[in-house]
Amino acid sequence: MSESLLPTLPPSGLLGADVQLASGVSNLGDEATLLFAERETEKVGGAPLPDAPVQEPLRPELEAQLAHVRGLLRDEFATVGEGEACLTCSFQAEDVLLLHLAMELRPGIPVLFLDTGYHFRETYDYRDRLTAEWHLHLTNLLPRLTVQEQESAFGLLYQTDPNKCCGLRKVEPLFEAVSKYRMWLTGLRREQARSRTALKEIDDFLLPGGVVVRKLSPFADWSTRDVWQLCAYFGIPLLPLYDAGYTSIGCEPCTTLPTDPNDPRSGRWAGKKVECGIHIQAGPAGGGDHATEST
């Protein structure tokens, strides 16, 4: 079996002590290898491997959280037709876990990726790997200007005016794409940043031009530990940049290792800003400012 195809598991330090291993399996890498082998065997028509490990039950709190998210997705999907809900994915852990759960109910859900042209090579490789292995219905959202055209016209905006750079390469293409859907799924969590403490699980999001889309953030009150343990539980491969110490991953020129161990987004934009703008509403129906953000 090719080593490159084996599931990538999160660093052991991020899992927590209560991730339990299946009986007879010495470590999570062995478990993931066996689970992968079982899936591959079933794909070609074979029976499940007799020695495949059995998943141990989740801790009750996390099991309840998972049941809540699955119930929320089931109920919300029942209100929109096929092709009317989309999921934005930066291919960080939260988004990939949400994608896994959403695809249980809607395998062909449209997946929107903001291809800014500035992402890490590892992000592009990981995106391509998951797209192929999970058979994703992926759309790469491109800015109106290529990287070369933008830099020719404005120079290195990520250095001189990161707000304008994000506006051109993230906000404009995303809002244009999301306006075509009735429902928008995100992996946002309140714990990610102080600017997200008001995040709602379900929100009516007003886009420029007056279009309102129903926005779901099912992991709003989840912790990083919750997300990583569920990824390990499902054997979900994760972006290899986490192994290098990154905790919040965006465009390469604007992402460094965290400078504050208590702030996972402290490695973004070199302290010039804290958010990119793609989750700030144009203006809520009830009036006043409303800002909830993501990567």
Image: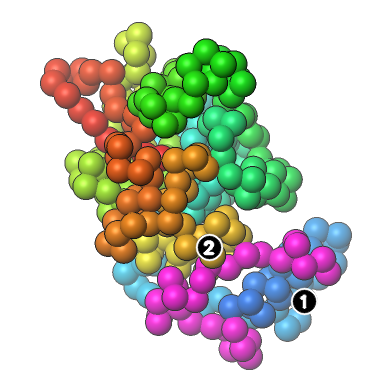
In this picture, which residue range is highlighted in magenta?
1-27
Q: Quadrant of residue 158?
A: top left
Q: Position of residue 218 (x, y in %)?
A: 36, 47
Mark 1: few/some/many CA within 10 Å (<14, 14-19, 20+): some
What's the residue at 32%, 69% (across, down)?
A: 61
Residue named by callout 1: 49
Identified by mark 2, the residue type is Ala
Q: Secondary structure at mark 2?
A: helix
Mark 2: few/some/many CA within 10 Å (<14, 14-19, 20+): few
Q: Position of residue 83 (x, y in %)?
A: 56, 27
Give the left or right position of residue 269, taking residue 35 as reference.
left
239 within the magenta span: no
Give the left or right position of residue 149, taking residue 71 as reference.
right
Residue named by callout 2: 244
What's the residue at 51%, 71% (across, down)?
A: 11
Instruction: Tell me, yes or no, if residue 19 can be seen here.
Output: yes
Report the disc number at residue 184. none
Tell which circle, 2 or 1, labels the residue nearer the N-terminal end: 1
What's the residue at 37%, 57% (across, down)?
A: 258
What's the residue at 56%, 16% (across, down)?
A: 152
Q: What is the quadrant of the C terminus in the image?
A: top left
